[in-house]
Amino acid sequence: MATGQKRAQNIGELKASGYTPVSVREELRRNMIKLIRDKKNIFPGIVGYDDTVIPQVKNAIISGQDIIFLGERGQAKSRIMRLLINLLDPEIPVIRGCEVNDNPMAPICRACRDHVAAEGDATEIEWLPRNARYGEKLATPDITIADLIGDVDPIKVAEGRYLSDELTIHYGLIPRTNRGIFCINELPDLAERLQVGLFNLMEESDVQIRGYHLRLALDVLLVASANPEDYTSRGRIITPLKDRYGAQIRTHYPITIAEEIAIMDQERRQFSGDEFEVYVPKYMKEIVAEVTHLARRSADINQRSGVSVRVSIANYETIISNAIRRAVTLGERLAVPRITDLPFMVASTTGKIELESFEETKEEKILDELTRKAVQAVFNRYYQVPKLEEIVMQFNGGFSVETAETMPAKSYVRDVKDIAGLATAVKAVEDSERPETVASAVEFIFEGLHLNKRLNRSRLEGRTVYRK
Ligand SMILES: [Zn+2]
């Protein structure tokens, strides 16, 4: 509909405008093809799926297929589903007041059919925006046919109305999303009789409510999500419903550390109006991402439920906040996360992962182990340990250094002056000479030397001491 043009207000005006209704699948397909042709970014904010998930979603829409996304938690399944809204027309005409968004040219509900029969072209229409044509529901065992599809009013039935008279129906979520997209999250948790109901509705346009057969010729694109193991477990999904989904698309976690970091930077909660600066060195971002990647391969962690990118995002927020807390406490202007901030990630990690065994104290130990491995892996990508021998030598004869998350950045600058070779090593990861960035790099180097067995480390009352 061109802007400025007066929108049709009734069926007569709509016909005169030349409007031809299309099914939701035709509409999605037409808009998808146009967006591809115009080289538009159809799934903004989705990172790392360009060559895997997104081409499959495009194919499914072009095919007019219902879609099921299979993936562990935190793989952007819900976000992709919601972005499908952008493939709908900005608005479509519906019969005014209709509960099931009836097409003015071909209403399916009894109330609208009666209305059109009586009023003809004068029947009023309204324009439905696309975000009102999307519905979603998390499948839980307590969902009923009434919630999802609808219910009949027993009083009206008792009054003698026929059940084929749809005026007695109270429509559920799916009919209310007619001519739109309906998503069911965690489909295997839906009770079997609801799965049967859903299948009949989609396949036969036929539904049984309280033992009565009703015809509901809905026009809905059905999308679902499921954990892959739940979905393939025998008996969790009825076979005909499985067959109904034309496209089964496997989602995945970010394959590279760079993709994990891109998501962390994009998704972390940001605030404005702070009087201090925040700077996160690249190696610190890599350590946070590496912890998550190692967790996804850890035998101690339940991989069936997975390790969400939300772990990376929350851990990233945590180390930044610990750096801010330090900066504010010490009166420093620049907040830079460093190695001694990493143990605080325990608050943002536990609760988002499930352990294979159920010992309570184990979570901190597992995170500590993952963190050590992550720091070492990242450190060894930046440094060749033998080239740092000049630094290590100066620890001969009982020399030691201390680090702490509460220690002012200036004391690390003193270390750089005292220890030959340290300044060069700092420069290898950080150009800036601001004390806060230097402090972070110094901690990274000492910890890296410790993890490579070049320095000993002891921890005492929040302080870490490195010595030979
Ligand atoms: Zn209607």
Image (spheres, grey):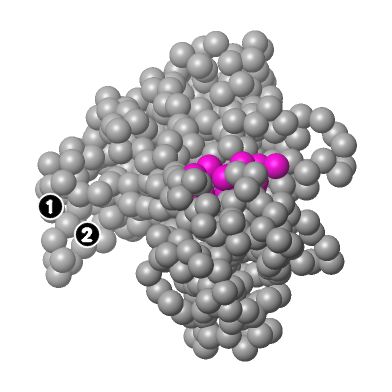
Q: Amino acid at mark 1?
A: Ala
Q: Residue at x 36, y 32 (%)?
A: 53
Task: Read off the magenta span.
Answer: 369-380
Q: Give the quadrant of the N terminus.
A: bottom left
Q: Pick the residue in front: 464 or 152.
A: 464
Q: Say whether marks 2 and 1 touch (CB < 8 Å).
A: yes
Give above or below for 136 relative to 457. Answer: above
Q: Residue at x 32, y 57 (%)?
A: 127
Q: Position of residue 450 (x, y in %)?
A: 65, 50
Q: Position of residue 401 (x, y in %)?
A: 68, 67
Report, in whole angstroms, how far the alpha carbon at label 2 lies from the one at label 1: 9 Å
Label 1 secondary element: helix
Q: Residue furthest front?
A: 397
Is residue 268 rendered magenta in the image? Answer: no
Q: Is residue 326 visible?
A: yes
Q: In the image, is the residue at mark 1 within 8 Å of ligand 1 by its beta carbon?
A: no
Q: Position of residue 296 (x, y in %)?
A: 59, 34
Numbered circle sitting on residue 50: none
Q: Amino acid at mark 2?
A: Ala
Label 2 secondary element: loop
Q: Which residue is mark 1?
A: 16
Left-right relation of 338 to 121: right
Give above or below for 230 relative to 23. Answer: above
Give above or below for 280 relative to 186. Answer: below
Q: Give the quadrant of the C terminus.
A: bottom right
Is residue 374 rendered magenta in the image? Answer: yes
Q: Which residue is mark 2?
A: 8
Q: If you read the primary sequence from the N terminus, does the residue marked by circle 2 or circle 1 appear first?
A: 2
